[in-house]
Amino acid sequence: MDISTFQSYAYFFFTAFMVVVLYAYIYHLYSSQWKGKRDYEKYGDLALHDEINDHPIEKISENEEKK
């Protein structure tokens, strides 16, 4: 097996792996939003609402502040 064949196989498997990672990430985003853990669509407006007096996206609970 020469190097070009090895490169072809490596490229194919790396591309397939990256597609699986992409779909797993998309599934994670939609499932966490559906379960109510976090709404990632609110972060889309972060660049538009970036003033110092704008309200925060998520409130920090008192338990997280003490950590």
Image (tube, rainbow, N blue to C red):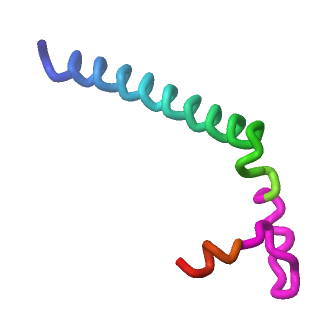
The residue at the far bottom in this view is: 52
Q: Residue at x 80, y 51 (%)?
A: 41
Occupied quadrant, residue 55? bottom right
Residue 31 image offset from top left, x and y in percent: 69, 35
Occupied quadrant, residue 50? bottom right
Figure label count = 0
- Is 47 colored magenta in this rendering? yes
Residue 21 image offset from top left, x and y in percent: 49, 33
Which quarter of the rendered picture does the N terminus lie within?
top left
In the image, 40 versus 11, the foreground residue is 40
Q: Is residue 67 above or below residue 41?
A: below
Occupied quadrant, residue 54? bottom right
- Is 46 colored magenta in this rendering? yes
Q: Is residue 36 above or below residue 14?
A: below
Going by the image, does 58 lie left or right of 23? Answer: right
Residue 58 image offset from top left, x and y in percent: 77, 67
Q: Is residue 59 above or below residue 44?
A: below
In the image, 27 versus 2, the foreground residue is 27
In the image, 54 versus 47, the foreground residue is 54
Going by the image, does 54 lie left or right of 65? Answer: right
Secondary structure that dominates the magenta span: loop
Residue 29 image offset from top left, x and y in percent: 67, 41
Going by the image, does 13 lie left or right of 25? Answer: left
The residue at the far top in this view is: 1
Q: Residue at x 71, y 48 (%)?
A: 37
* Region rendered in magenta: 43-60
Q: Residue at x 79, y 57 (%)?
A: 44
